Every structure is written in structure tokens, then in C-alpha cells.
């Protein structure tokens, strides 16, 4: 009988294969965690972009553009306005204004009513308009208590700052320059 005198040689090929498999599985786990973080970040960025887009759309779709303004009755202001392009219909009661006179002279705020808004083509303000739409031009009556045209005209410089706010919409800013407090004098 023949005897086998071969010595056992360490077989480490299997150990290397198991180690490589452990490293491979670890890489897959790390990649899965990294991809989950990337997907979560991309989703959050998409939500922020959507919210920003909605806010911007709301602000632009509810904006009033002032085209001209005049003194009326030596104290009131009549503004000729339109809604911004792409605006939704705006209820008159959703519009308010802030009027700032020069240093120390005063500040006032008020909400518009249907009697303060009229179609530009209609004489006077009788009846008024309850809702403004983008296809029509309007005139807005601002009847100030403190910042009257005569009062602002006596200041140096003869200016008042006007903000028109639309609830859940945009804000319009305009500087009113009253060089003459007589009826029909332009202020913009």
C-alpha cells in the first residue's frame, strides 16, 4: 500500500473570498444609506421649490399695479389701477393700504370697501365694485385722515409713501409726490 506523505497546506482561498464578500456587502449597505440620504435631500429640495413657487405665484397673482394717481377734493387720492398680469380675481375687502407721511407727520392704515373701488369707465364712486378682475381697469379712492394732499404738500419734500396690500397676495409700493394740492394734480 502506498502512503501519502503530502503535508497539509493552508488553504486560505476561502478566507479571502469570505473577506471580499463582507467588504462587498458593506459597500452595498453604505451605498444604500448614501442613496437614501440623497433621495431624502432631493425630495426635501423639491418640496421647498414647490412651496417657493406657490408663494411666488400667490404674490404675483394677487398684485395691484398703479398706473396713475391724482388729487381729488383737495385731500383725497384717486389711483388708477389694474391687477397684475395673471392675477386671480381679488375681493375689494381683501385690499388694504398704509400711508406714511414725512417725518413726524403721521401714519395711517385702512381696508378698502366696495364704495372705495369703481370701474375706471364709471364716473364717481357710487355703488362701487365688490371684486376686481384682471380684464378691467379700476380707480381706487383713498380718503386719508392725516396724510391729506394739502398736509403733505406743506412738507419738505412733499411726499407720502403708499403701500397697497392684497391679503394672501402681493404688496405694491409707490411714493406719492404732491407738488400741488389742487384737484386733478398728478401725484405719481
Image (spheres, rainbow, N blue to C red):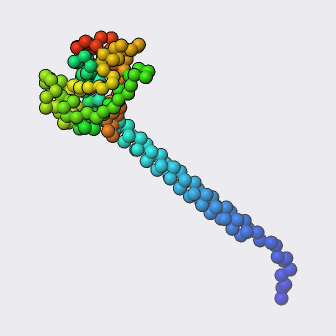
Taking depth in this image into account, of 138 and 51 the one nearest to the observer is 138
Does residue 173 appear in the picture of this structure? no
Q: Where is residue 163 in the image (x, y as percent from the top left)?
A: 35, 28
The residue shown at (23%, 26%) is: 141
Q: Position of residue 50 (x, y in %)?
A: 40, 44
Taking depth in this image into account, of 48 and 134 the one nearest to the observer is 134
187 over 45 or under it: above or below = above
Classify residue 100 by image quadrant. Answer: top left
Quarter placement of the C terminus: top left
Number of dots carrying numbers: 0
Does residue 26 appear in the picture of this structure? yes
Quarter placement of the N terminus: bottom right
Q: Position of residue 53 (x, y in %)?
A: 39, 40
- Work out which residue is located at the far bottom of the displayed protein and give it: 1
Classify residue 183 by image quadrant. Answer: top left
44 over 145 or under it: above or below = below
The residue shown at (33%, 11%) is: 179
Q: In this view, does 49 lie to the left or right of 9?
A: left
The residue shown at (38%, 37%) is: 56
156 over 98 or under it: above or below = above
Taking depth in this image into account, of 126 and 79 the one nearest to the observer is 126
Classify residue 85 by image quadrant. Answer: top left
The residue shown at (16%, 31%) is: 128
Taking depth in this image into account, of 130 and 17 the one nearest to the observer is 130
Amino acid at each position: 500500500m502506498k502512503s501519502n506523505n503530502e503535508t497539509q497546506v493552508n488553504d486560505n482561498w476561502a478566507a479571502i473570498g469570505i473577506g471580499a464578500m463582507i467588504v462587498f456587502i458593506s459597500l452595498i449597505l453604505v451605498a444604500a444609506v448614501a442613496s437614501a440620504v440623497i433621495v431624502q435631500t432631493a425630495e426635501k429640495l423639491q418640496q421647498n421649490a414647490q412651496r417657493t413657487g406657490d408663494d411666488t405665484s400667490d404674490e404675483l397673482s394677487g398684485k395691484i399695479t398703479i398706473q396713475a394717481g391724482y388729487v381729488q377734493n383737495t385731500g383725497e387720492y384717486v389711483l388708477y389701477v389694474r391687477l397684475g398680469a395673471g392675477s386671480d380675481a381679488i375681493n375689494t375687502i381683501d385690499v388694504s393700504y398704509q400711508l406714511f407721511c414725512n417725518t413726524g407727520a403721521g401714519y395711517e392704515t385702512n381696508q378698502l370697501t366696495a364704495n372705495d373701488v369703481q370701474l375706471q369707465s364709471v364716473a364717481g364712486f357710487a355703488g362701487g365694485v365688490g371684486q376686481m378682475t384682471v380684464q378691467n381697469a379700476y380707480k381706487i379712492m383713498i380718503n386719508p385722515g392725516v396724510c391729506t394732499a394739502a398736509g403733505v404738500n406743506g412738507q419738505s419734500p412733499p411726499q407720502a409713501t403708499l403701500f397697497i396690500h392684497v391679503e394672501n397676495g402681493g404688496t405694491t409700493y409707490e411714493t406719492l409726490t404732491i407738488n400741488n394740492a389742487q384737484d386733478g394734480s398728478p401725484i405719481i
